[in-house]
Amino acid sequence: MSLPHLKFLRIHDQAAHSILLNHLHIPTGASATLEFECGYDRFPISDHHPRSLDNLGNISYITSINLNLRFRPAIRLKGPSGDLHMVGYTTDFFPRTLDTQALQFLNELPISSTERLTISWYVASADSNTEESAAYQTLLTMNRLRTLTLTDCINLSFILALNPDHNASNTVLSPKLENLVLNTAGRRDGPFFDELLEMAKARASMGARLSAITMVCLPGLISKEKVPDLRNYAGNFEYGFDGVTLRRDAVGYDSD
């Protein structure tokens, strides 16, 4: 069914009603929101996403992905004009062990054209091999990724995946990556500064120098003595503490 004048579509019900997105053509310029209640035996969005994005003209290819894993697990896919927002309304605690399943679901989408990836409240599992990690598999196909934002994530796996020295193939994942934003102001786990420095240095040596690294954290988690070292391997390095020096839009996440 073609809906040429559609501007906004909201679907709120159970998984079976999600098949509407497989039969309705959502035109460029329209936005679709899929809201649902969910349980926790597996990552809930997997039950609700459309089998194909062919009918979603508004995101004929995905340029921006926003994955939020706190309390209301949600994913927002944006295209040249319009977006698809899937959000689960939960009544119980969302177990952190499902975060890897969330990234595995993300890998089922056509993400090769994605230029911006934002992930909030991701907790990496203990993967012994970087190339087997969910973070590595996610970044593997993102050859056009330019901005990676990690908000309140335990994100060591992402940093290591970006580091060529930790890849057996010695390649640079996301070779066009320019901007890395780390916001750990809500955690005391630290921004893994040493691993960040190692990653920036390795990428610079292979011609994939980052244009900018932006970091917000709790006071005391950044060694100011190491800041000049990081500036040697990134075009610009900004850091601040929660609510002090950096703009909200530089480090925030999509909470709609």
Image (tube, rainbow, N blue to C red):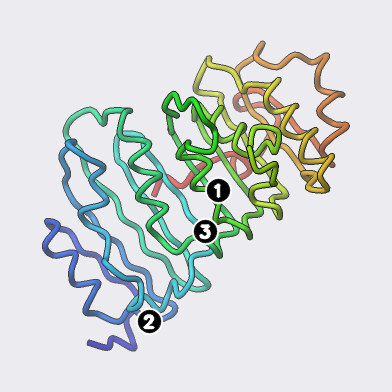
Residue 172 relative to residue 228: left or right: left
Q: Amino acid at mark 1?
A: Leu
Question: Residue 149 location in percent, x, y?
Answer: 58, 42
Q: Amino acid at mark 2?
A: Pro
Cα gap from disc 3 to disc 1, whole angstroms: 13 Å
Note whether 8 is above or below 3 in the view shown: above
Q: Residue 170, located in which quarter of the rendered image? A: top right
Residue at (61% x, 33% y) in the render: 159
Q: Mark 1 or mark 2: which comes first in sequence?
A: 2
Query: Residue 139 — which label?
Result: 1
1 or 2: mark nearer the eye: 1
Residue at (62% x, 55% y) in the render: 145
Classify mark 2: helix, strand or loop. Answer: loop
Q: Amino acid at mark 3?
A: Ser
Residue 65 relative to residue 247: left or right: left
Q: Mark 3 or mark 2: which comes first in sequence?
A: 2
Q: Nearer the viewer, residue 132 or 21?
A: 132
Cα gap from disc 3 to disc 2, whole angstroms: 18 Å
Residue at (54% x, 63% y) in the render: 63
Cα gap from disc 1 to disc 2, whole angstroms: 29 Å
Label 1 Cα crowd, 10 Å radius (few <14 / some 14-19 / many 20+): many
3 or 2: mark nearer the eye: 3
Q: Nearer the viewer, residue 111 or 225?
A: 111
The residue that mark 3 highlights is: 64
The residue that mark 2 highlights is: 27
Assign the N terminus to one quadrant of the image.
Answer: bottom left
Question: Residue 180 location in percent, x, y?
Answer: 67, 41
Q: Are marks 1 and 2 in contact (CB under 8 Å)?
A: no
3 or 1: mark nearer the eye: 1
